[in-house]
Image (spheres, rainbow, N blue to C red):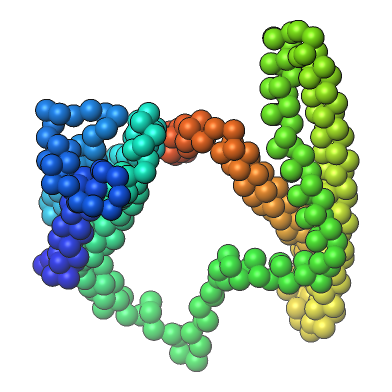
Amino acid sequence: MANPWAIVLLLAYVLIDLAWTIIPFGLYIPGFGFDYNTLERNLNPVEYNILKNGFDFLVCTLLRFIFVLLGLILIATKRSTKLFFLIFASFGVCSISFSLVKLLCFSEYPEQLKYVGIWMSIVWNILGSILSVASFHFLIRKWLFKTEYERMQEEAEAEENPEENAPANGEEKPEKVTRKSVTAHVKFLLQYACQYWPWFSMACVFLVIYSTARIFIPFYTGQVIANIVHRDEKSSYAFYSTVLKMCGFMIVATLFAGLRGASFSWGGALVNRIMRKNLFDSLIRQEIAFFDKMQTGAILSRLTTDCQTVTNILDLNINLFMRNSVMLVGSLIFMLNLSWRLTVVTFIVIPPIGVFTKLYGDYYDVSFWDY
């Protein structure tokens, strides 16, 4: 039987999605007023203009409803939705890219960027694409037709084989082993890193300087090529000046890259030392029976290889996370300063690339296990 609360939430989402798609059409005017003629013009496909009209957003909304309806039918008929969910998610990702394409279309008339309704339509189309996939996954797949079939099947198996679940005479039921979450492991490793925070802080400072210098190198490389193409007396002076600046940034990047690597390596070595010491202190406090069960090679492997592996994971991930974060933020600011339209073009191609990467990864996994 269908869950009534899931039905109510699904209907509420459909109405909200439709309302937030249509209402902004009346705000495609300067100021914060609402114009019914503008609303009718945007809803009329005959007067459609890709540079001025928002009828595309209504089409995307209707396609989202069609996908939700098809998913509802598949779930109701107990069909597999794995492929359908992948197609639905791909459509949502492409819809997000289309929102950015519409932003570039509206920017052909710069005065339109001052309309509140245009920004509402773009933002809601992105949010609606995300919410539609989320509503299908959580409301329809997991909640709408939720049954107790699996629980009843487990109870039936337990009734058929009670001796497997009952403990033997005189024996205690073995304790259930619980695995710690990834967050707990990260906190545990960061506690070791915090003991040598001066070295890691120094490494982060060197990393910020290195990443900042790396951000400017592509820009000055382009300036050098432009000066070579447009060669004259004025550009010759600019050419030598640009080359000197580029060389300066490369020297700074190379110098601080070495200091960054040395600081992270030394900090990792200190963490490795204290980790091995703590493990060794824990081992010598064990009872003799512990060493009868454990092999000497396994203990030595814990003290050498495993500690080194954990330490490498710690400093490597901190290094990569900080470097990529600084370069992402810095490059984004630099790109927006040069041309915000080209920056939007970059973000347009990111979602489809992510989808194709996911599809190729799944295909590669299937092919790997087949062979």
Would residue 216 be found to the left or right of residue 12 on screen?
Answer: right
Q: Position of residue 344 (x, y in %)?
A: 47, 36
* Image point (38%, 79%), residue name: 165
* Image point (85%, 65%), residue name: 198
Q: Position of residue 203 (x, y in %)?
A: 82, 55
Residue 244, by quadrant, is top right
Would residue 304 be found to the left or right of residue 38 on screen?
Answer: right
Number of numbered tags placed on the structure image = 0
Q: Nearer the viewer, residue 318 or 203?
A: 203
Residue 109, by quadrant, is top left
Q: Nearer the viewer, residue 309 or 60?
A: 60
Would residue 68 be found to the left or right of residue 187 on screen?
Answer: left
The N terminus: image quadrant: bottom left
* Image point (48%, 32%), residue name: 341
Whether residue 80 is situated above or below residue 52 in the rendered picture = below
Q: Position of residue 312 (x, y in %)?
A: 76, 54
Query: Taking the image as drawn, is residue 85 in sight?
Result: no
Whether residue 293 is situated above or below residue 118 in the rendered picture = below
Q: Position of residue 329 (x, y in %)?
A: 62, 47
